[in-house]
Image (tube, grey):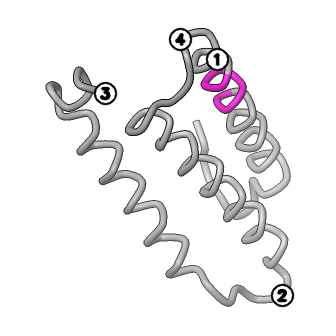
Amino acid sequence: MESFDRYGLNDSIYKHKKNMEEATSRLNNPPSSRKDCYNEFVGIVSETSSFSRMATDPSGNLRSYAENKSNAYETITKMLDQFKIKYSEFLGDTK
């Protein structure tokens, strides 16, 4: 979107997306005791990457875009909440 480019938001989105993907790749081959945690984290990263593409490459009309964005945000939020509950021992303080 033009306004994102104007304010440098696309660059910020791309930077954070790249950092997230790099962090995920450094976590490859987790111990078997943490495999489920890793797999869920990869799912969150994948959903977040899709969400970031909505900002940098929007599609659809205003109504469908707003609905898709809202649904994606809700999905990611639920995934993160569940992740924090299930794997709080690995996360430390999440406040």
Name the chief secondary structure element in magenta.
helix
Residue nearest the observer in this picture, 55 or 41: 55
Estimate the x, y position of residue 91 in percent, counting from the top left: 64, 57
Label 2 belongs to which residue? 32
Q: Is residue 59 above or below residue 84?
A: above
Label 4 belongs to which residue? 62
Q: What is the CA distance from the residue labelled 4 to the residue labelled 1?
A: 6 Å
> Would residue 70 be counted in the magenta stretch?
yes
Q: Which residues are magenta?
A: 68-73
> Dot 3, how many residues are within 10 Å of its Cα: few (below 14), some (14-19), or many (20+)?
few
Residue at image location 38% in from the left, 62% down from the top: 19
Q: What is the CA distance from the residue labelled 1 to the residue labelled 2?
A: 41 Å
> Can you tell which mark lies on residue 1?
3
Q: Earlier in the sequence, mark 3 or mark 2?
A: 3
| Residue type highlighted by circle 1 | Ser
Residue at image location 58% in from the left, 20% down from the top: 65
Residue nearest the observer in this picture, 42 or 83: 42
> Can you tell which mark lies on residue 64?
1
Q: What is the CA distance from the residue labelled 1 to the residue labelled 3?
A: 16 Å
Residue at image location 65% in from the left, 48% down from the top: 47
Residue nearest the observer in this picture, 1 or 79: 1
Q: Earlier in the sequence, mark 1 or mark 2?
A: 2
Estimate the x, y position of residue 94 in percent, counting from the top left: 60, 43
Estimate the x, y position of residue 39 in percent, counting from the top left: 77, 69
In the image, farthest residue toward the left: 6
Q: Is residue 81 above or below residue 18?
A: above
Q: Are marks 4 and 2 in contact (CB under 8 Å)?
A: no
| Residue type highlighted by circle 2 | Ser
| Residue type highlighted by circle 3 | Met
| Residue type highlighted by circle 4 | Leu
Q: Are marks 4 and 1 in contact (CB under 8 Å)?
A: yes
Estimate the x, y position of residue 2 in percent, counting from the top left: 23, 25
